[in-house]
Amino acid sequence: MKNRELSATNIYMTLYRFFKLSVRRHEFRDIFKEKLDLHHIPALNNVLYWDEILFPIADFYIKKERWNEAIEIYEELESIEALDENAAECYQKLGFAFQKQRKYAAAIDAYLKADTLKPDNIWTNRHLATCYRLNRNYQTALTYYKKVEEVAPNDTNVTFYIGSCLTELGLNEEALNYFFKLDFMENNSIRAWRGIGWCSFIGLKYEQAIKYYEKIIDHKPLAIDFMNAGHVAWVMGDIQKAAVFYGKAITISDSREQFLEMFHKDEGPLLKQGIQEEDIPLMLDLL
């Protein structure tokens, strides 16, 4: 085993020196910029197709953000049952590679394997929470964010995402508590103000909602902030003020079409707040 590892290391070091350090390296195609598939070459298979070699190759791919190739190596290591004591870490890395490719279901599967082998790891729980949230499974995401919160109660990102998941689940009062906590933890927290503004709007606390949207507008507003301020002004009965806010949202949007796409997504909440369906096209005609 020792001789095999040394031989494999010598082969890779020789190749690395040639393709990276040789004075003639520019005359050749750099294999280290390509797929390091040497362990599949029959002549080298006996020397290189071992876990002692595949682990560093996989780590190299992770470091270089070559996610597909990293996934392939980790899955090969799993198939030859070579993970052993490194299994939890390898499943974490496999999950991370899937996550970077936005393959959240596959990432979750890998992270859950890591969690089985090494339970209650904060890194794994944090990434499980992220993947479940991005996969729109807000209830399960909330479960994992709460686990992270137990270990890191002052983590502002976790506080924000717990509030966001609660908002998506319609638990606005609980969400408000987290956004107020975030506002206390961060100075001039625009993301906290957005959360407070929206949850206040949904919870019929219009004065509070407009207060926080105006705070955002005094700092660094986005088109969606002007639009949401318009929603609040409208349900408060101030059509002229609503039209002004909507007009500013259109002005800083990439296009009127982009604004309309955002606006139509909020028709449901507007109707629940008492806006009549037939009044929506009339408002849009004013803009």
Image (cartoon, grey):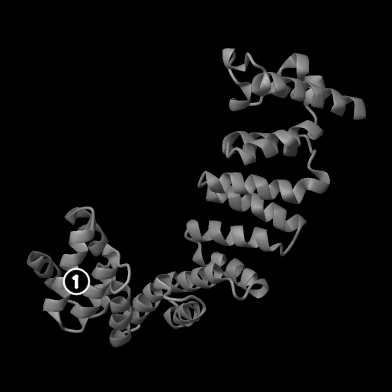
Instruction: Say which residue label 1 marks.
Output: 245
Q: Quadrant of residue 213?
A: bottom left
Q: Where's the N terminus, which quadrant?
A: top right
- Amino acid type, label 1: Phe
Is residue 244 shown left or right of residue 190?
left
In the rendered image, is residue 277 in sight? no
| 270 w.r.t. 253: above or below | below
Tell me what residue is drawn at x 82 percent, y 22 percent: 47
Q: Number of callouts in the render? A: 1
Q: Where's the C terminus, which quadrant?
A: bottom left
Tell me what residue is drawn at x 22 percent, y 59 percent: 252
Residue 286 percent across, percent down from the top left: 8, 68
Q: Quadrant of residue 145?
A: bottom right
| 93 w.r.t. 249: above or below | above
Is residue 279 shown left or right of residue 200?
left
Residue 118 percent across, percent down from the top left: 76, 58
> What element does badge 1 sit on?
helix
Residue 48 percent across, percent down from the top left: 78, 25
Q: Quadrant of residue 223?
A: bottom left
| 150 w.r.t. 45: above or below | below
Q: Which residue is nearer to you in this view: 1 or 155?
A: 155
Tell me what residue is drawn at x 49 percent, y 75 percent: 186
Q: Which residue is nearer to you in this view: 247 or 93?
A: 247
